[in-house]
Amino acid sequence: MPSLKDLRNRISSVKATQKITKAMQMVAAAKLRRAQAAAEAARPYAERIEKVLANLAGGVSTGAPVLLSGNGRDETHLLVVATAERGLCGAFNSSIVRLAREHIQRLQGQGKTVKILCVGKKGYDQLRRNYEKNIIELVELRGVRQIGFDQGDAIGRKVIDLFERGEFDVATLFFSRFKSVIQQFPTALQLIPAQISANENEAAAGGALATYEYEPGQDEILATLLPRNISVQIFRALLENAASEQGARMSAMDNATRNAGDMIKKQTTLYNRSRQAIITKELIEIISGAEAL
Amino acid sequence: MATFHFELVSPEKLLFSGEVDAVVAPGAEGVFTVLKDHAPVMTVLKPGVVEIDAAGNKEKLFVRGGFADVGLGGFTILAEYAIPVAELDAAKLDADIKNASEDVADAKGDEARRIAAEKLAQLQELKTALAL
């Protein structure tokens, strides 16, 4: 049986924790709103660039750039794993890492070489345990307050640079797609060779693209557009990730706050009961003492 | 004057969307104006100023390269980076120029160097044109 003092200490420490989790939840809610707005603002560009690419790719049949068609090999895979810089956000980081790990195991089972580029420290920490020698680089975004296109572009350039040096054949990006505060889906997206087949048929059916004039040439435009598309995809993934992270943290902290509340309630009941028991005991002692006289 | 739909988007946000009379864009092979019912054209943009004329309201925005897509549905510019000219100052442009000259120094291969040098020249030209 804990003493009254112990109980009091325990209650006050849980209360302090509850205050922290509550504050974290509110901060996450505010940041989520900003992150969501940023993710939405980035959407038109990504949609347009996809449409333009689909138009262009529909017209190119032979001699397509390697970024679009791949280099024909399928031996070395690059996994770009984008996670958060901070923990305390529920299963957010681990679910991305789990998806990446499943991917790695499957690829290694097929005898392929795997290279990992980590974006965000948490994913790096988790992957390092098993795949330290596969990790080629860690990009930290810790100092970045609001993710701008420059960050996405920098990573995109890095990926393209590696590809041009023949360091890998296929690149896949891992991140968490934001659906709502309680739903985030870890997603794998193939970057190289580019996947834009979904819109291709639709674009070809439109027929209007045949009349396009290209300046300079179609191939030159495609050659500049494709690297751009990779940067845009990465940028978008980073934004989705930021929103997902805050959403996950918000619900995790909401749970924590509620748990702390439950715990305070239980401890307070226990505290009151033992306090009353002590009073009763003292009364009995006094009364029986008086009777003995 | 007949209007058409025009959109200017950068990766970070939608900067302009609406009906306009005319748009002047800095194409890689020369500045061009788009009016209603322009033939479908897709072109690369060089760093320069986009002029939007919407019912007499003129707006000028600086873009740092991008793509222009004139289609049947309207005109879309996918800018790499865009800000209103009023907010552009010499310091920002100088930073871009510095970046571009670093690119020239870093470029591997003749083709990459040529492209980087071209971009640098375009930025410098723009700086003199805007008299900053």
Image (cartoon, coloured by chain):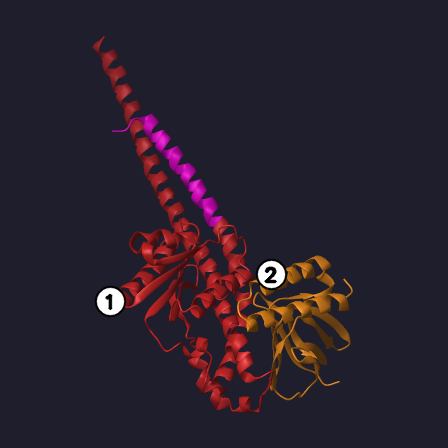
Question: Which residue is found at the position 38% from the left and 71% from the top?
Answer: A170
Amino acid residing under circle 1: Gly
* Chain bearing mark 2: B
Neighbourhood count class around disc 2 (C-alpha, 10 Å): few under 14, some 14–19, many 20 upward: some
> Is label 2 in a helix, a strand or a loop?
helix
Q: Residue furthest left?
A: A292
Task: Answer with the quarter of the image where residue A213 lies.
Answer: bottom right
Q: Position of residue A266 (x, y in %)?
A: 32, 39
Left or right side of A224 for B131: right
- Name the tint of chain B in the rendering: orange
Residue B11 visible in the picture:
yes
Amino acid residing under circle 2: Glu
- Name the tint of chain A in the rendering: red
Range covered by the magenta-colored residues:
A1-26
Quadrant where the image shows the C terminus of chain B: bottom right
Was residue A112 drawn as part of the magenta stretch in this picture?
no
Residue bearing mark 1: A109
Question: Which residue is found at the position 68% from the left and 59% from the top?
Answer: B94
Neighbourhood count class around disc 1 (C-alpha, 10 Å): few under 14, some 14–19, many 20 upward: few
Quadrant where the image shows the N terminus of chain B: bottom right
Residue bearing mark 2: B102
Residue B69 visible in the picture:
no
Q: Position of residue B32 (x, y in %)?
A: 70, 81
